[in-house]
Image (cartoon, coloured by chain):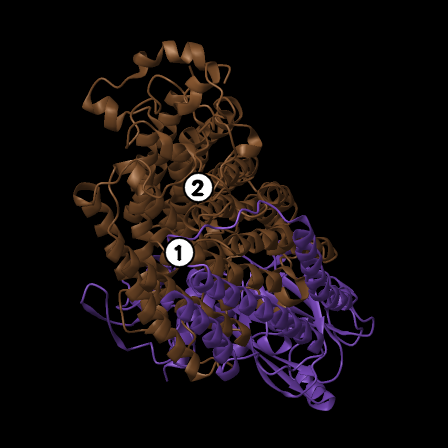
Amino acid sequence: MTVAILLVVIALASVLFHALSPWWLTPLASNWHQMDATLVITLWISAIVFVAIVLFIAYAVVRFRYRPERRAAYEPENKKLEWWLIGLTSVGVVAMLVPGLYVWAEFVDIPKDALTFETVGQQWQWSFRFPGQDGRMGTVDAELIKPDNPFGLFPGNPFGQDDVLVQGSEVHLPVGRPIKVLLRAKDVLHDFYVPHFRVRMDAVPGMVTGLWFTPTRTGRFELACSEYCGVGHHTMRGLVVVEEEAAFHAWLKTQPTFAQSMSKVAAGTGDGLAARGRDLAQAKGCLGCHSVDGNRSAGPTWKGLYGKTETLANGSTVVVDDDYLKKSISDPNAMIVKGYSPVMPPYNLSGEELDALIAYTKDLSK
Amino acid sequence: MMAQTPYQESLHLHDPQSFWTKYVWSQDHKVIAIQYVITAVSVGLVALVLSGLMRLQLGFPGSFSFIDPTSYYQYVTMHGMIMIIYLLTALLLGGFGNYLIPLMVGARDMVFPFVNMMSYWVYLLSVLVLMASFFVPGGPTGAGWTLYPPQAILPGTPGSGAGIVLMLVSLIIFIVAFTMGGLNYVTTVLQARTRGMTLMRMPLSVWGIFTATIMALLAFPALFVGCVMLLLDRVVGSSFFMPAVTSMGQQLDYGGGSPVLFQHLFWFFGHPEVYIVALPAFGIISDLISTHARKNIFGYRVMVWAIVAIGVISFIVWAHHMYYSGMNLYLGFFFAVTTLIIAIPTAIKVYNWVLTLWHGNIHLSVPMLFAIAFVITFVIGGLTGLFLGNVAVDLQLGDTYFVVAHFHMVMGVSPILAIFGGIYHWFPKATGRMLNDTLGKLHFWVTFLGTYAIYFPMHYLGFLGVPRRYYNFESFEFIPPSAQTLQAIITVVALTVGVFQLVFVFNLAWSAFKGKRADGNPWRATTLEWQTPDTPPVHGNWGPRLPVVHRWAYDYSVPGADQDFLPQNLELVVATAGHEGQRAQGSEA
């Protein structure tokens, strides 16, 4: 009897939990309401089956509990009943599959008029590229990826010159228009995942993948990497800002084109050593682990780092100066700051590059 | 059957001569089974501790300074891999398979006892190699149990030095070990069944283990080559799975390989693996329910065909793990359909378990409690599989806590409940003593209610969209603070359940020496393993004469019979004396 009561309690508690749970689908901000509908249909069918089976067991263990004088029935098979059950199950499966495949058919059919942009993942940050005035994106090659060409664009490709390059993890999109996201990865698998939009897709090095959605309301939506990508995976965040078309275009204009960024490189230290350090930190992936705003990440933040006295894992202290920084770049595990793990690979940088990075950290510590 | 005579003659040659050959270098399937069980449970306890550490970080982020992202991801990876391969696969096939197959089909041993012994020792080697990775510089791999390249072998992942190499080597060794055991299980079922034991009279435990073993023999090679190729990519710089990549700002010498290829190889093994674990559990549960409900399993033939159907279909569903991996999107249609079709034979199994209870005479013994709990958790895990199998729903729930909850229900908690039920059920046969009932019930309720409380609410974190494999969720705006409260509650429950497993370990150790003595057939079961002349069965299992089987495995409560069970080897003599009558004891003349 106790067993039966507990089983009934489990069934009821599960239903109650669902009814009272403060945790439910994150409010939708895209066109994929049919995905939610499929999920809800599946949930209802599942719930009915689950409750029915649990209650059936609960009833059976009471009704047919052991009594020495009784004998169980002897019924090896019941073909009619079995066919009925197979039939009913098949109906349930079809009821879930049909809406699911219907939505999927829409997902694989990418609208022709979609606004296309590219998202590039690297450990542990995002960057974005929009086609310029010509509406076409320049061709790329993974082997062209260099600190001054982080997207790996062909320098001579005419379609690439006006491509808009967005460094930093925030991207803006216009509301109410189908958006096609092309995905690339520089190093390992990543995954473009915005809970509010429902859809996701892996970014895979060596190939271009994609997904599409139509943002249906303005707002700021968090972008998270959802394919495990190494020790900084949980820090690989971004932000998708959905806004009115005009605001979007105004934002896009503030971002540099490929041609502009190349001419800056050609002009050498036009922007100063610290600016070069910033570009370098972006390109080398430093900023995946070292924030510049004081937030804790996989590695210590660079904000206020220069000149600070750090306690090391072995308990000793060290003042962060040129020597310490250089040493920590070429041999990161020699002097680990307390509370961090020895995960950074050694970097072999030129003296000029080191100077640029140090100038940048000095800049951040003013 | 055919091979009995020569085998019988050489029987004494195989008798163990000393303590070492009897208990250590033993070729007796029962000793090997117990070696497998002890090793798998030990390594499982390591994985249990790792999950506790992981839960500490998730429930109380930042409170334990020794759990940094590196060690957290190492715990996640090692927990998953140990539990799935080195605990579940080894315990269900190497442990239960070894113990039950020869006894249940009426054989004296596995057909290749030496190879069987080697299987265990090679398995132990794979475990030791894996454990060694905890002690190498950089520690064990933190690549996630799926070991996806490129990250698994690049420096951004913990343990990408020696850790990943040891993991791959250990898996390769494990597969060698399994193949030696697996060939034995299949051959024994096909060649060494006693007279009268037709395939359609075998207990469902044997059917489950047999089918799972065939599947494993077909699926593990995919993992094997995947591991070898990944090892080559890592060690000699080949590019099977490695395209041109820029890691940490540096161009590497890789190029032309495909990360998605590894995923295909991995999941071609990985999905059947789910059923390699599930089918033996299905079989065990069928036998437990039938025995303790004193009723024949409902729809035996359909149950057998469902096992076979699941085994076959499970080879064409693997890419439902890869809907958004970058593979051709149109494949989603095919794999969603096959995945949901597999729900039909699986559902039939559930129906037949609960219908077996109907009009039964149900003993709520500890094994039966675990069987009922298995059905409930398996139903939840199976139903949530329909969400994830349905490609459009997977797109939003994939890689969230919904997935974590789903696979823990379906292939974590469920098979473990079946294993517990099986151990409580067969312990008296293996040791001659009963496990303590009170401790058993305590262990059961804490484990069942506890795991339910852990994983049921976890689905709702998934609905919310909380991503899995996150060290922490700092500053996420779409995750409300209440989700962190839930994480903390889950951690407390998980630690409690974890600690209570010591009750089980204690019960095993204590009852093995001090438990109530059991007679040869305490559950009054029909299957052959309960009809051995000695308990625990001695080397060779059956004494001078092999049993002869006269009926299927489920003759419980047969109308008109004197007792409520008819052992498979019992021949009912209908008043005719002579030759037939001499075989009434069920032994071959």
* Vertical comparison of B338 with A4: above or below: above
Foreground: disc 2 or disc 1: 1
In the rendered image, residues at marks 2 and 1 fall on the same chain: no
Question: In front: A13, or B299?
Answer: B299
Which hue belongs to chain A?
purple
Reading the image, the residue beneath label 1 is A66
Q: CA distance from mark 2 to mark 1?
A: 51 Å
- Tell me where residue B202 appears, x and y as whole percent: 51, 34
Q: Is residue A236 visible?
A: no
Q: Indicate the chain coloured brown by its letter.
A: B
- Which residue occupies the extreme right position in the image? A112
The chain letter for the residue carrying disc 1 is A
- Tell me where residue B2 appears, x and y as whole percent: 51, 15
- Which residue occupies the extreme front position in the image? B575
Location of residue A35 by image quarter: bottom right
- State the quadrant of the C terminus of chain B: top left
